[in-house]
Image (cartoon, rainbow, N blue to C red):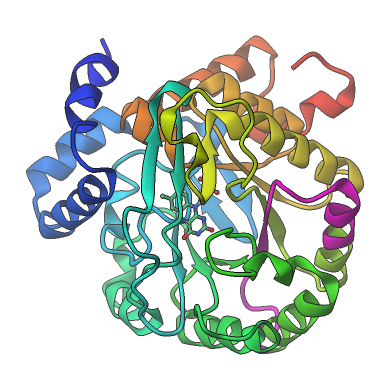
């Protein structure tokens, strides 16, 4: 029986959201050598099934469900995410220098909508700190780690490429893939970097630095019109990026019930689910399934996860759903996905990617 939603969550949600989040991350960091706790969490939260394994960009993903960027910005708990059942984890967003982010309060639970609004503003301890955190035994790594790169608050847009290249150069050996974040709504004008004239120099400079070594992905906003997404996909193909992460949070406020709905920032969770799935559908169609898509936005259940896989995502991420459903949700989602595969007589999750485009019922 899952006691999280009716016993644990009401108690946890009495605390300030940012305080609670920081406390969890700090405690995980402090208890990183606690083998008993690690074993307990591992037993409770992990689910391994061959049908969920995938090989993408030369990396082995034990399952398609990852932790989304923003949860562990500084990599303080990076070696826990495999024990919580995730198939990969994306650290960051990290900027070249440490920065405090926006003034609090900047993180709001919209419980009636099963959503979050955040305007954190890339609070993080900077590239050098993350490098130090990851500079421990590589053998400890059990799942792929992505690193999400951003630009500093005060870096002008036409100089932004320098920040992305700096972050990439410093962390190149520590990430299995890199996400180029040009879609957070909480750094002034950052999303303007999604325009071709500003994005091209970033992609060109990164790929020159990269020289084919690492998969680079573009994380995009759900608030773009179809034509803008199509233009971005063209750029992604031209610069041979490895994939797209769809999507970041939205600044739209689709019919919300919670009192805090009008807070400024990016909205995540259930109200984002449909739009992010639409974006996945669109990109899959545009690229005829040739571009790996990481689907993120409002995944709370196996049904939500399946919709995004069927729309064309080969990997998934979650943040808000984990907060609302608790750590047991990863295992539940993975079990549910395997049940779907079995019901449809599919051998592996790769066979299900883009299922909805083959004229089959989702
Ligand atoms: C509090 C919070 C902080 C976030 N910080 C980042 C970030 O630093 N970089 C980033 O690319 N996305 C960030 N995100 C967006 C998530 O990675 C994800 O794209 C979005 O929340 C949608 O997924 P979800 O509905 O499962 O939460 C953040 C989301 C939340 C809720």
| Residue 135 picture location, percent across and down | 30, 78
Q: Is residue 135 visible?
A: yes
Residue 66, image x, y percentages: 48, 45
Q: Is residue 226 magenta?
A: yes
Q: Position of residue 292 (x, y in %)?
A: 72, 51
Using the image, determine if residue 274 lies above or below residue 341. below
In which quarter of the view is residue 91 placed?
Answer: bottom left
Range covered by the magenta-colored residues = 209-232
Q: Is residue 148 above or below residue 323?
A: below
* Closer-to-camera residue (141/322): 322
Q: Is residue 131 above or below residue 274?
A: below
Relative depth, front residue between 266 and 284: 266
Taking the image as shown, residue 197 lies to the left or right of residue 101, namely: right
Judge by depth and name the residue closer to the eye, 65 or 185. Answer: 185
Give the position of the C terminus as an image quadrant.
Answer: top right
- Horizontal relation, residue 66 to residue 100: left or right: right
In percent of the image, x 33 and y 49: which residue is there? 81
Query: Within the image, what quadrant is residue 354 found in?
Result: top right
Q: Please give the name of the residue rendered at 56% of the width and 85% of the height, measured from the top-left corner.
A: 155
**Magenta residue check for 160:** no
Left or right of residue 338, residue 281 in this image:
right
* Vertical placement of residue 95 versus 68, above or below: below
Horizontal placement of 212 versus 325: left or right? right
């Amino acid at each position: 029986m899952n006691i999280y939603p009716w016993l644990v969550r009401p108690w946890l949600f009495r605390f300030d959201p940012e305080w609670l989040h920081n406390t969890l991350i700090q405690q995980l960091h402090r208890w990183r050598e606690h083998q008993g706790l690690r074993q307990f969490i591992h037993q409770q939260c992990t689910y391994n099934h061959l049908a969920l394994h995938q090989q993408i960009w030369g990396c082995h993903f034990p399952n398609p469900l990852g932790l989304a960027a923003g949860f562990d910005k500084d990599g303080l708990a990076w070696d826990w995410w495999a024990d919580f059942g995730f198939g990969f984890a994306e650290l960051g967003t990290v900027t070249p220098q440490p920065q405090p982010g926006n003034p609090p309060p900047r993180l709001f639970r919209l419980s009636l909508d099963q959503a979050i609004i955040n305007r954190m503003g890339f609070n993080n301890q900077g590239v050098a700190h993350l490098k130090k955190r990851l500079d421990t035994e590589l053998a400890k790594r059990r799942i792929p780690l992505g690193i999400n790169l951003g630009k500093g608050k005060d870096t002008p847009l036409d100089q932004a490429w320098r920040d992305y290249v700096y972050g990439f150069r410093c962390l190149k050996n520590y990430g299995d893939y890199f996400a180029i974040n040009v879609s957070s709504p909480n750094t002034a004008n950052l999303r303007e970097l999604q325009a071709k004239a500003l994005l091209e120099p970033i992609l060109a400079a990164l790929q020159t630095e990269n020289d084919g070594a690492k998969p680079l992905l573009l994380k995009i906003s759900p608030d773009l019109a179809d034509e803008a997404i199509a233009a971005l996909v063209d750029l992604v193909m031209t610069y041979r990026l490895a994939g797209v992460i769809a999507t970041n949070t939205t600044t739209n406020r689709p019919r919300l019930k919670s009192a805090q709905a009008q807070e400024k920032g990016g909205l995540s969770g259930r109200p984002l689910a449909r739009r992010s799935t639409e974006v996945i559908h669109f990109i899959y169609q545009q690229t005829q399934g040739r571009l790996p898509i990481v689907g993120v936005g409002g995944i709370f259940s196996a049904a939500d996860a399946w919709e995004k896989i069927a729309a064309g995502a080969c990997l998934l991420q979650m943040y808000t759903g984990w907060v609302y459903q608790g750590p047991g949700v990863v295992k539940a989602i993975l079990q549910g996905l395997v049940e779907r595969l079995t019901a449809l007589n599919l051998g592996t999750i790769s066979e299900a990617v883009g299922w909805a485009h083959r004229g089959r019922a989702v």
